[in-house]
Image: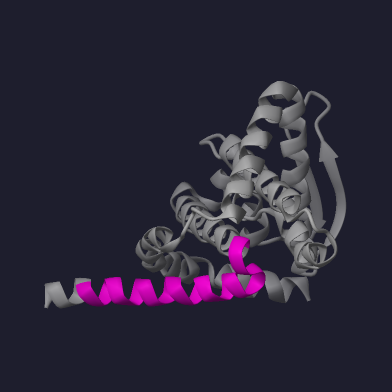
Amino acid sequence: MNRIFDFLINLCKWPTALIVLALIPGLIESYSRFNFFTMQFYCVGAGILFYFVTAISAGSEIRSQIQIIAHELTHTFFAYLTLHFVRCVRLNPDGSGGSMVLKGRGNWLITLAPYFFPLFAFFYMLIMPWLTEIIEQKWILYGIYGYFIAYYWGTVLSQVHLQQTDIIREGYFFSAIIIVGFNLYTTGCLFAYTNRFWHGIELYTKLVGKLSYELWQNIFSLIV
């Protein structure tokens, strides 16, 4: 079954890149539609600030080890999502990196997932609506959410570089399109979730499609 998933996902590799390219103008425009001056965003911002303060205090070695763990776990999560058996997950003793060994060929989604998917934030998002129902101090919950957002940003920024083997494997051009486009969308979804949880992400996705369509329609009108 994983061979079928790999074949279909790899078949969609460049069509996905073209779609992402088409959506980037709308994704950029969508950020102007957010109202960041709300109590929820202030609490999220405090959580983001707290992460960077603690990350600096922790030192580069500890910070790197935690980011490597998140990186390999994200590979593993997407391997399981595409029905692969994961043989093992290794961390290099010297802290230089790690690896995830799976059964089967794999696909570009598994390879590039750590560079656009906020694993820990995602699992927190699954329980956050429930937590807001039972915990009165909601500002704490939004602060934790901001911490996970910053953790995702910090991990991506620290691991995207020209020597990264995952990026080399999928090609610089394709990887650049996916990483930039998907991160714009992921960050937008994280912001949209702040106000309306999963319904906010649904509305945001529709907004991106609408804005992208309108922008390209205007471009074609000018050309014609």
Q: Position of residue 170 (x, y in %)?
A: 55, 52
Q: Position of residue 197 (x, y in %)?
A: 65, 68
Judged by its main secondary structure, the magenta piece is: helix
Q: Is residue 64 above or below residue 26?
A: above
Can residue 97 be seen here? The reply is yes
**Residue 39 among those drawn in magenta:** no
Q: Position of residue 33 (x, y in %)?
A: 41, 63
Residue sitting at 65 percent across and 47 percent down? 146
- Horizontal side of 11 relative to 67 (left or right) equals left
Question: Toward which corner of the image does residue 122 lie, by quadrant?
Answer: bottom right
Name the colouring of the figure. Answer: one colour
| Frontmost residue, 136 versus 111 | 136
| Frontmost residue, 73 versus 38 | 38
Q: Is residue 140 above or below residue 202?
A: above
Range of the magenta residues? 194-218
- Horizontal side of 85 relative to 38 (left or right) equals right
Q: Residue furthest right?
A: 87
Q: Is residue 49 above or below residue 59?
A: below
Can residue 59 be seen here? The reply is no
Residue sitting at 37 percent across and 68 percent down? 22
- Horizontal side of 49 relative to 81 (left or right) equals left
**Residue 210 among those drawn in magenta:** yes
Q: Position of residue 107 (x, y in %)?
A: 65, 62
- Horizontal side of 90 relative to 208 (left or right) equals right
Locate the C terminus by quadrant.
bottom left
Locate the N terminus by quadrant.
bottom right
